[in-house]
Amino acid sequence: MSPPPKRSIWNLLFLISSFGLAGMAGVLLVREIMPEWAGVQIGYNRRLAEVTGDRSKAWAFPKIRQIHLPQMNRTDRCVTCHAGIDNPKMAGQPQPFASHPDLGIPGFLEKHPFNEVGCTVCHHGQGHAVERQAAHGPVKHWNQPLLSKELTVGACATCHQNISGLKGAERLQKAWALFKEKGCIGCHNLHGKGMLIGPELAETYSKSPDQFDFKYIGAGSVRHHGEETVALWIAEHFRDPQKVVPGYPKLGVPETPMPNYGLTEEEVQLLTALTISFAMEEEDEQHPIPARFHVPAGAAEPEPVYASKVEQGAAIFQKVGCVGCHGPRGSGGIINRNMDMGEEVPPLTHVSDGYSKEELKEIIRDGRYPARAQRDGLSPPLWMPSWKEKLTDEEIDAVVEYLYSLNPETSEASPKSAKVRIVA
Amino acid sequence: MKVKLTDLARTIRMSQIWRSIFRHTYQDTPRNRALMILSNVFMHILPVKVRPAAIRFRYTWRLGEMSFFLFLLLTVTGVFLMFYYRPTIEHAYWDMKDLRFVVPFGPLLRNLHRWSAHVMVLFVMFHMASVFYRSAYKSPREYNWVVGVILLLITFLLSFTGYLLPWDQLAIWAVTVGTNMAAATPFLGSEGPFSIVTPETDARFILLGSKLVGQAGLLRFYVLHCVLLPLVFLVFVSVHLWRVRKDDFSALPVLPAEEKKKGTRPEEWHKQHPEELDRKVFTWPNLVSRMFVTALVLTAVLVAWSLLAHAPLEEIANPNKTPNPSKAPWYFVGLQELLVYFDPWMAGVALPTLILVGLMAIPYLDKNPRGVGYYNFRDRKFAVGMFTFGLVFWFVLIFIGYYMRGPGWEIFMPWEPWDHFRAPHSDTLRSMPVWAGLLFMLGYAGAGLALWKFALQGFFKKQGLGVIGSSVTVFLVMAMFFVPVKIILRNFFAIKYILSFPAFSFNI
């Protein structure tokens, strides 16, 4: 019999893979015995022993703690590390050990018992996760990362259907006032109501980051890498819409018509929180809210009584969002690319010079598409929508009366418009 | 009293209990080496002695062994996963999250299962290729090749059914792409040509228990994945291994170096040196130790991979949010890529069926006796050429589909960022008029006949291939080349369909 084939390489492979497997088994065992969260919990136990003076507490065996809420389909393991949230003695301790503050609202903690509402319903983040990065985010494929301090207020709307007068939601109220002031609803749809020039706002925050273009945000790229969050996109879009959505002029895709309102950083955060709250108001099939948690909206505010038609018209001009494109008191200044008459939504201060009241009513009723400045250019992204389904004839009358009152030459009440234009 | 450890061991080994379990000692004698195989039900699948050539790494590349080992590994990890997984749309996704975060060794289990599955699909394909290139499917092993092709199909199906179970966006849309092809089956699919069924009675409905991927589909895939397909696999793999044993390994002893240099063909040399064929070594430990080390290395690699990379888990399945692009599992992406060029009934049903039937037919068409038991490309240029073309084409399509297709199934280079707003590649496609289409198809058939008559007739005759065998070979070859022909027609001549009968939704 001839000698069997050489076997040295097989011996070597045997050794390497055996030791390799043993080493990896060791790594796995250590990971199982001493996971990240166990270290945090041991730290918590020691601190608890210090604070309470009860030495035995330091030796509690670490274990995964969770708030299991099958009705809401949530399992919040946040309390594995944030073990002191319901312990008043841990007030003022550093995170993750601190107790949950009451936000200076009496009864806040009693009304939001943690073992019934959990954590993620207000704070978002991945409740199932017990790893720091995966739990807080942002991580790939978890589209609701932990909300920042500025944005958490947006989650109140998940249960509170009426935030006006809600204590602790003052920032959301401010944001809502800003929303009305800017006339967003003149272009956007909100819960299916409003105009369809811009996108539905209640859908924005429930989209996946994959559906946004992050190319123009920071050093970002179009592909979603995990650190790109929808909130980040929304905030940057408020700061400078045309930077984030510059379109593809070469391919005939115009930049976004969303006006750049020159918002302050505070306003950007407010409106981002508000956009989040719009998405929270929608029903979430994955995480339903039990009926008993719903705080219903109060009675609708009664329609105010107006002293004059002009006053009523001014209120409607603000309420339905004409102000969003035509500017406060019709002063204009909103860019509409490639629109004739100076690539700008027409200011309305001088309409009484060029139009009869009947002509104005017709334009408001039926809407109008602007003409292009350059014939071969892109069509202007903004247009005058038809209002006949939103406003009654009487209300349109009032708006026209208001517009007629804006002319500084015939009405001393109006401020001087910088841009006087004859609308032909 | 002092008890000697060796005495104790001896006492145990001599006891009735021990001897009733272990039938022989472990002294290294030829008799015991033989008994290691003969007296063990599992080892018995191996012969007692093998030719040294059969256990060379560079002969089998240990691919068949590794595929079977992966099946075992997948069964073990799969059973553990079943303890934690509920196949309902309420729980499935969240059970995956629990496996990832709180189940002891959960990530290891899931990652091992996922990566092993990918590797198994790949290795089964490579195993088939290696068997082809060393002619190990030729007589008397034709039928075992057929069983192998069936095992390849079951491997695909096992992996495909498992793909749905995590119930994330990746899963639901990959399976939607796959099962929509079933709806395009001729006759039996509601969207296929000559359909005779409704969406509620067609092939897709049988697969999914619904028109869409939902709870019924998840349960069906779960049962198929965990029970039915593994059982069927076990039946066929038993036949497969038993046949390998009964038909003997094909490997021919390696030629002496000087003979090899002269270009001597091994089969001829062995006719003069029959004693070489009988030179064998004991399977234990020569083959068994290598099998063991192979399994060990493979396990180590897979565990390392599982430590480094988590199995993907995207957002929870949402039937209302279609990712753009939605891709099938990688091994089916080649077929999905063909959807650009063919209707679903061709890309998803007709071509895969032809591929499988064609593969199974290979041992009955390739009667060339050359090359059995070693890698010989010189004496079987036609067979190797055709097979290699098909194999490379299959992987090229997978590469294009997987790495070069972005939103809107537009071409993006692998290093290019995906741009959702890039202008779609649009050219106006035309279909040939019916007369031109018929003429083209007739012309193509004519080209096949010409190929037969003028190029291959002598070759077929030499091999003793009859009219049926010859015509089937020509048909399969022409069918294979029809795919690149159509790709060229579409990309360079803007032809959408060669032959189109919209009334029957029959388009080629």
Image (cartoon, coloured by chain):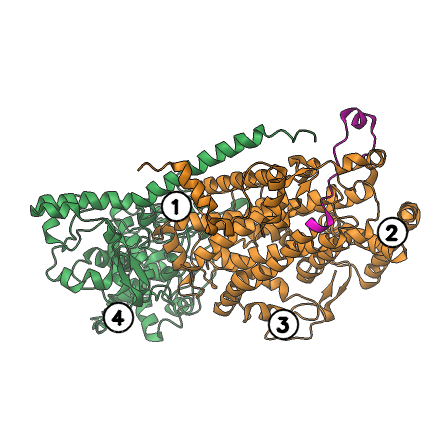
Stretch in magenta: B244-266
> CB under 8 Å between callouts 3 and 1?
no
Q: Is mark 4 on a helix, strand or loop?
A: helix
Both marks 3 and 2 on one chain: yes
3D distance between C-alphas at marks 1 and 4: 49 Å
> CB under 8 Å between callouts 2 and 1?
no
Chain at numbered mark 2: B
What amino acid is found at the position of numbered circle 3 in the picture?
Asp
3D distance between C-alphas at marks 3 and 2: 37 Å
What residue is pinned by disc 2?
B447
Between marks 3 and 2 in the image, the one whose residue lies nearer the viewer: 3
Both marks 1 and 4 on one chain: yes
Which circle's residue, 1 or 4, is located before the other in the chain? Answer: 1
Residue A309: give its label.
Answer: 4
Residue A357: give its label.
Answer: none
What residue is pinned by disc 3?
B202
